Image (cartoon, coloured by chain):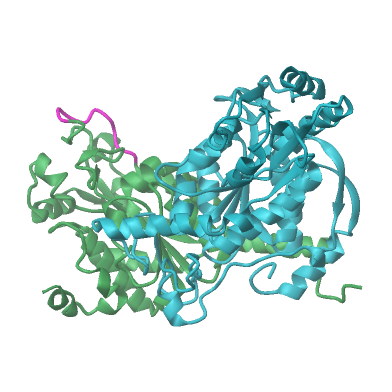
């Protein structure tokens, strides 16, 4: 059965067949993200041998690990970006991609996200934001909309969500964009840009979790959630002209920042050359 | 092999930068130079007293050797970055103290489970909590052993002097590489900040090991198998097109997760234990003084082994037959040798800068012999006369 399901998929060559079918629930946005990532690589013609995928813990960490056929490092909860930092320093010519969720990257791992952006290390982060801790049963997250119902905010969420893309754009990333799983072509295009940017790039994908989030918030069907995304998405240019109270509960989509800033691994290698010169450690004879 | 890649170039750089001979330096600096000579070319750390000079020395020296110093945002990030870098082929190290060591415990377990070579230096300071942050102690004996959760083996070495710190760090790297496992250097704030003479060797006289790499595609497909029969699988590094999958979840020999089959977990965790246990004799190291002929045995480690030796020498002058056993490998503890030594001994003293930790390990091997701890806390090391008084008390 499983073989038939994936053999129809034209990007199957990017997947680890022995790990399929995926553990993602029916209707999960994770498949859309994996598909967008595979399409982006395909369009760029990147060999998966030139990619290392790093992920943390949670449903979204599973999107590319173990399913994506590349070197994959499935790490501890929240630490994917810190692990990826070591990988990138060791393999500066490879594309290092972190795919994980909002709880993993923006809550427990928020500090690593912030500092990787500040360092502007050439890592691409695809952060799948489904507003909820899905794998553990639907608990409130720092991304859960104000007023939403979850298993640990059973009456209503009294906290306000973190604006991840805005925060990371401010922290110094080279490229930041936000889309939803209802904006697949824009998403593919942004992932491509993110992979090509020299520096830290973040693509935040608002994604549906009908099982743990939608079900408790009057959107049982995945399609209802996608319609909710479309209805409430506001392009960045328009959002800039709107008063903050009107933006409450909206999803601002688009590219938040594209800029050139010195990149960390280039800087550290430049420093090594400088030190070699300063101490006369060049390739001349040891004597 | 010092590092992956350019071996003669590294020897050339080491020779050019560090002339063999006698130096006067701090324990922390000796740890850093030991790491550099052992081939460490990636360090990720976070400042913490009393370990910071290790980071400072690495930050200064690593770029000269074309190595990388990263200051991370916290200790959790430090060990994470190290593990990532180790999978690209670097020999990696970090140094910390009690509070940072506590933060690293989760990822230390990850390194055990994913069989990632790394060296973690814990410059023990007085705890619990912030305690006496600038003072040395020996309170992390069991944090090193059981700090991370679940069944796991661990290797920890503990130097007794500045020169020893250099060589024990080299040894820690060799064990980590040979057995594809994290190794802890259980150092202490006293020797870390003690300055004394150390002989820096010719880099070519330092014996060093590099991890086993897969010899063919077949071996590369079993990053967590046992193709060589000694429990230590070759490590298929990232970036070589092996499509290696590494996870802290229970995994099969090919690296793919399987958390549902009891036998898979049993097989994996028992092999990880077996690979350390079957190499115990190679890993274990200790020093003995006057143990051929003794009534009283002193067992001590790290900084406390020094006044212990002083006390044993003084006791001998007084005609008391005292001997000293100093484990340099504290985990796995050389219990077999201790059991042999205990035959015919009347009493055992265990001096240490804590309220009794090594003594609990010794107890497992001491069936009938009375044990007594010589314990001191407060940040000041034990003195010769304090230990001698206890020796006289049991003589």
How far from the left and from the top, in percent, is residue A28? 17, 57
User: Which sits in the foreground, B162 or A136?
Assistant: B162
Residue interval drawn in magenta: A154-162
| A81 versus A108 height, above or below | below
Residue A35 inside the magenta-drawn segment: no
| B234 versus A247 height, above or below | below
Q: Is residue A121 visible?
A: no
| In the image: residue A54, left or right of residue A271 | left
| In the image: residue B143, left or right of residue B314 | left
Residue shown at 68% from the left, 63% from the top: A270
| A51 versus A175 height, above or below | below
| A238 versus B144 height, above or below | below
Q: Quadrant of the C terminus of chain B?
A: top right
Residue A17 appears in which quarter of the rendering? Answer: bottom left
Colour of chain A as rendered: green
Residue A249 appears in which quarter of the rendering? Answer: top left
- Hey, which residue is sitting farthest bottom in the picture? B216
How far from the left and from the top, in percent, is residue B378? 68, 19
User: Which sits in the foreground, B301 or A77?
Assistant: B301
| In the image: residue B126, left or right of residue B324 | left
User: Which sits in the foreground, B162 or A37?
Assistant: B162
Q: Quadrant of the N terminus of chain B?
A: bottom right
Task: Decide whether the magenta segment is chiefly helix, strand or loop.
Answer: loop
């Amino acid at each position: 059965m499983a073989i038939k399901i994936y053999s129809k998929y034209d990007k199957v060559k990017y997947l680890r067949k022995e790990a399929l079918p995926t553990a993602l629930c029916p209707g999960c946005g994770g498949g859309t993200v994996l598909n967008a990532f595979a399409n982006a690589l395909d369009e760029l013609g990147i060999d998966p041998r030139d990619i290392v995928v790093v992920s943390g813990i949670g449903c979204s960490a599973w999107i590319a690990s173990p399913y994506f056929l590349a070197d994959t490092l499935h790490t501890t909860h929240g630490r994917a970006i810190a692990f990826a930092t070591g990988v990138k320093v060791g393999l500066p010519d490879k594309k290092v991609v972190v795919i994980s969720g909002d709880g993993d990257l923006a809550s427990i791992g928020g500090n690593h996200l912030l500092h990787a952006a500040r360092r502007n290390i050439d890592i691409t982060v695809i952060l799948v934001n489904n507003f909820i801790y899905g794998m553990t049963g639907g608990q409130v997250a720092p991304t859960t909309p104000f007023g939403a119902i979850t298993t640990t905010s059973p009456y209503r969420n009294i906290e306000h969500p973190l604006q991840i893309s805005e925060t990371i754009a401010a922290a110094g990333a080279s490229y930041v964009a936000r889309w939803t799983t209802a904006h697949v072509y824009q998403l593919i295009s942004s992932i491509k840009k993110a992979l090509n940017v020299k520096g830290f790039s973040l693509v935040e994908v608002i994604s549906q979790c009908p099982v743990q989030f939608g079900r408790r918030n009057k959107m049982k069907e995945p399609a209802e959630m996608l319609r909710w995304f479309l209805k409430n998405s506001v392009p960045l240019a328009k959002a800039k002209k709107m008063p903050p109270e009107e933006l409450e509960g909206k999803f601002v989509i688009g590219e938040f920042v594209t800029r050139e800033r010195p990149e960390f691994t280039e800087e550290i290698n430049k420093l090594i050359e400088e030190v070699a010169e300063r101490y006369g450690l060049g390739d001349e004879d040891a004597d | 092999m010092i590092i992956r890649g350019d071996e003669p170039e590294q020897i050339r750089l080491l020779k050019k930068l560090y002339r063999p001979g006698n130096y006067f330096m701090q324990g922390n600096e000796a740890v850093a130079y030991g790491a550099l000579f052992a081939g460490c070319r990636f360090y990720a750390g976070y400042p913490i007293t009393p370990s910071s000079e290790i980071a400072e020395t690495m930050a200064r020296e690593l770029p000269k050797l074309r190595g990388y110093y990263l200051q991370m945002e916290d200790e959790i990030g430090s060990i994470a970055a190290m593990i990532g870098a180790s999978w690209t082929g670097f020999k990696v190290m970090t140094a910390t103290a009690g509070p940072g060591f506590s933060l690293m415990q989760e990822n230390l377990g990850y390194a055990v489970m994913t069989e990632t070579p790394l060296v973690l230096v814990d410059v023990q300071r007085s705890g619990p909590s912030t305690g006496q942050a600038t003072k040395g102690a020996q309170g992390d004996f069991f944090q090193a052993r059981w700090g991370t959760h679940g069944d796991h083996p661990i290797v920890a070495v503990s130097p007794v002097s500045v020169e020893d710190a250099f060589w024990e760090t080299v040894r820690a790297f060799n064990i980590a590489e040979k057995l594809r496992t994290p190794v802890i250097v259980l150092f202490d704030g006293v020797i870390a900040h003690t300055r004394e003479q150390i002989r820096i060797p010719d880099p070519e006289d330092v014996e060093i090991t590099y991890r086993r790499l897969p010899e063919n595609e077949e071996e590369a497909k079993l990053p967590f198998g046992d193709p060589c029969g000694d429990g230590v699988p070759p490590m298929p590094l990232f970036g070589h097109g092996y499509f290696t999958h590494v996870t802290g979840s229970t995994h099969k020999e090919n690296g793919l997760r399987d958390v549902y089959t009891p036998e898979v977990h049993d097989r994996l965790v028992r092999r990880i234990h077996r690979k350390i246990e079957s190499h115990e004799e190679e890993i274990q190291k200790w020093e003995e003084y006057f143990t051929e002929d003794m009534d009283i045995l002193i067992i001590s480690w790290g900084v406390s082994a020094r006044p212990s030796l002083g006390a044993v020498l003084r006791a001998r002058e007084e005609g008391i037959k005292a001997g000293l056993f100093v484990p340099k490998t504290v985990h796995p503890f050389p219990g077999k040798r201790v059991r042999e030594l205990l035959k015919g001994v009347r009493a055992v003293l265990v001096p240490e800068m804590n309220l009794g930790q090594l003594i609990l390990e010794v107890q497992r091997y001491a069936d009938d012999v009375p044990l007594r701890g010589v314990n001191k806390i407060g940040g000041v090391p034990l003195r010769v006369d304090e230990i001698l008084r206890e020796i006289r008390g049991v003589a």
